Image (spheres, rainbow, N blue to C red):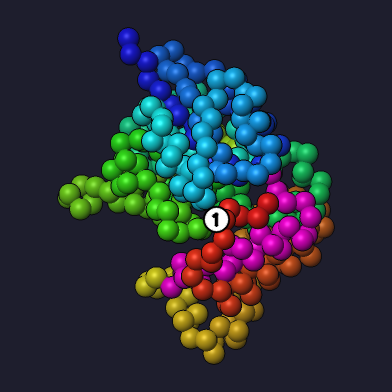
Amino acid sequence: MTERCISAVIPVRNQPDTLDILLGSLIRQVLPEGWVHEVICVDNASTDHTPEVIASHTGVIGMREELLGPSIARNTGVAASKGELIFFIDSDANVTGDDFLARVIALAEGFGEFAFFGGPIVLPPEQVPNPIAFADHMACWSSWGAMRHDGASDFQPTACVMQRKWFDKVGGYRTDIRVLEDWDVQMRVSECRLAEGGEKLPAYFVRSIPVTHSARSSLSRTIKHSWYWGLPSREAWLRPGPDQFIYLETPVLRWAYLPYLFWARLKAPLRCGWRVSRKRALLSLPFLAITVLVWTIAVIVGKGQPEGDRYAPV
């Protein structure tokens, strides 16, 4: 019987410590009968000891990509893979349990045809007591928290599962955008059958496959990260539609709308943090407010996809 394969694809640049933990977790995965897995790690021109970490894990397929960008690295990894299912995960995240991929496979077989699916993004337990890390996590991942219910999904960052045939059909990740490249490919995969008269492919959020994601534990790192993500966000929001912030096209009005935009961005992570722990939400509130304010200002002053190494500051 021919074995079926799921490929884990990880782009990495200068994150040896979290990568070491992730690779160990993926190598230990126990899969159902008839399935195998491969772990493909694409070192995106790291300048530290990340290559040595990759080489230290027997069974990991290590690759080197000199052209910078997580999209480029992911496309390189997929091109070298053989899986019918592709599991994308960031190098600062980690799976939960040695049966994580077995749960993913069971879900994929149950869904049939799908665009993508993923689960909650949670804070590693050791970082929960840190109010800055708690604030950083809520600001980034509150929409994908453990309290969200199973159902349809319109975006799954950090870790998601896709079917290889649909990923190949749309040509993989675009390499000309720095942020929201994962949202872009997921939307194109979802809609890839529409031009041929087919239906939109479904996408799912599933609580049973959470991943952990390391948060920034210093305020300076959190501010730098918020600024990075805010700068190109205005361009993403200027698409036509009743739910878009069209007023940001008018320079005079941008600063007038700062209080509204600040509150619109703050209330979701604040509400999520309150539901998780009222005490921790209160302790982290000053740091959360600073983080969101920096992001809001960056949205107002920023435009387009800034140049750089295309990796978010860590």
Label tally: 1
> Residue at horizontal 39%, vertical 27%?
83
Q: Please give left or right for residue 206 compared with residue 46 in the image.
A: left
> Residue at horizontal 56%, vertical 74%?
302
Q: Is residue 291 visible?
A: yes
> To which quarter of the image does residue 17 belong?
top right
Query: Vertically, is 179 above or below 27?
Result: below
Query: Vertically, is 81 above or below 76?
Result: above
> Residue at horizontal 40%, vertical 49%?
173
Query: Vertically, is 94 above or below 44?
Result: above
| Residue 297 x, y percent position in the rendering | 64, 75
Name the amino acid type tagged 1. Arg
Q: Please give left or right for residue 310 compared with residue 110 in the image.
A: right
Q: Please give left or right for residue 167 compared with residue 223 in the image.
A: left
Magenta stretch contains residue 227: yes
Secondary element at tag 1? loop
Q: Nearer the viewer, residue 43 or 236?
A: 43
Magenta stretch contains residue 51: no
**Which residue lies under the disc numbered 1?**
310
| Residue 139 x, y percent position in the rendering | 65, 58
Q: Nearer the viewer, residue 284 or 17?
A: 17
Q: Residues within 10 Å of mark 1 (few under 14, many from 20)?
A: some
| Residue 33 x, y percent position in the rendering | 44, 12
Q: Which residues are magenta?
A: 212-238
> Residue at horizontal 57%, vertical 69%?
231
Outermost residue, top side: 1
- Quadrant location, the N terminus: top left
Outermost residue, left side: 197
